Amino acid sequence: MKKLTKRIVTLSTGDEIAVYSNSPKPKSVVFLGIGQTDKSAHYVARNCDYSVAVAEGVPFQSRKLTRNPESAEAFGIDSVCRVFNVLETDAMTVVAESQASLGVVFALTQKELPVKSLLLLSPLGLNKKHMGNSPKQRKNELFRRSRLNWQLPSQSLRIAGNRWTLLSLLGSGLLAFKHFSSDFTNGISYDITQDLVKLNNKIPVKVFSGDKDSIFPYHEIKETLADTNIDVMKLPDASHINRGTPQGVSELNQVLSTIS
């Protein structure tokens, strides 16, 4: 069994997140999406085939966070930088999934961080135009897609990782849930295409998505990035899933296997 090192990162809100490493000097750092907390990060680090540090999802649902896009963006950037500060390693490959993609991409475009390549997995921010023409349309489309996604067998609450995420979100309290609608609407209104183009001129960037991902599907991301030089790679038979599950780790291993 792999020996893990746990580091605690204190965020600007006073909230704390855990970062688990399965080697003394991890070659990659993985940023998990919202709701994937301590247990999920531990599970991924324990079961991943590669040398990684895994940061649990940054709590954008925190009751201490000011509810506007600017503060959320600054919070995401600062949180990514704080994770790098506790790792103190050489240049790493960065993997960001789902909602974590925004904070990571903004941090890498605005800060000097020790990164040698970027891999985005089912990322938020690359299918805005497919979600609708207004914030209301995008919100409704996101929740429609999310309902479809939660009906898939991969989302079964019989799988421990899915229960951990649900309990994490429920534990955020009613006030946090009150803000979820506006938070998600703000998130899906971003388009990170130009940020990725700039990054791709400095470091290799690859984007991965499942052909059965109902929220951020491969064909929509492929279309968004069609006029760029960014590689978009399809994960066959993959839906939008929790990384802290057997299937989630298996897909992460596929993504990490592409690092040259």
Image (cartoon, rainbow, N blue to C red):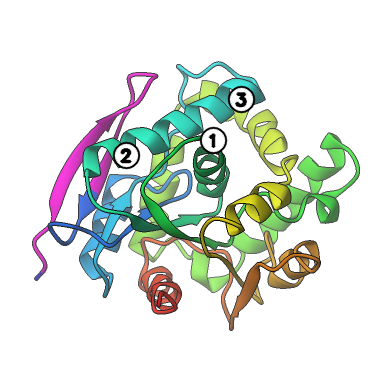
Of 139 and 52, which appears nearest the observer? 52
**71 in relation to 210, above or below:** above
Instruction: Please report the residue visible at 73 percent of the width from the left and 46 percent of the height from the top.
Output: 191
Residue type at tag 2: Val
Q: What is the quadrant of the C terminus in the image?
A: bottom left
Displayed quadrant of residue 148: bottom right
Instruction: Please report the residue visible at 72 percent of the width from the left and 41 percent of the height from the top.
Output: 190
Q: Is residue 174 toward the left or the right of residue 27 in the image? A: right
**Disc 1 designates what residue?**
110
Residue 15 is inside the magenta segment: yes
**Disc 3 designates what residue?**
178
**Disc 2 designates what residue?**
83
**38 in relation to 182, above or below:** below
> How many angstroms separate mark 3 from mark 1 (CA)?
31 Å
Mark 2 is surrounded, within 10 Å at the Cα level, by few (under 14), some (14 to 19) or many (20 or more) other residues, namely many
Position in image of residue 237 (x %, y %)? 58, 82
Residue farthest along the front direction in this orientation: 202
Q: What is the quadrant of the N terminus in the image?
A: bottom left
Position in image of residue 118 (x %, y %)? 49, 59
SS assignment at label 3: helix
Q: Is residue 123 toward the left or the right of residue 5 in the image? A: right
Residue type at tag 1: Gln
Magenta part of the protein: which range? 2-19
SS assignment at label 2: helix
Q: Is residue 158 toward the left or the right of residue 103 in the image? A: left
Displayed quadrant of residue 202: bottom right
Position in image of residue 8 (x %, y %)? 21, 35
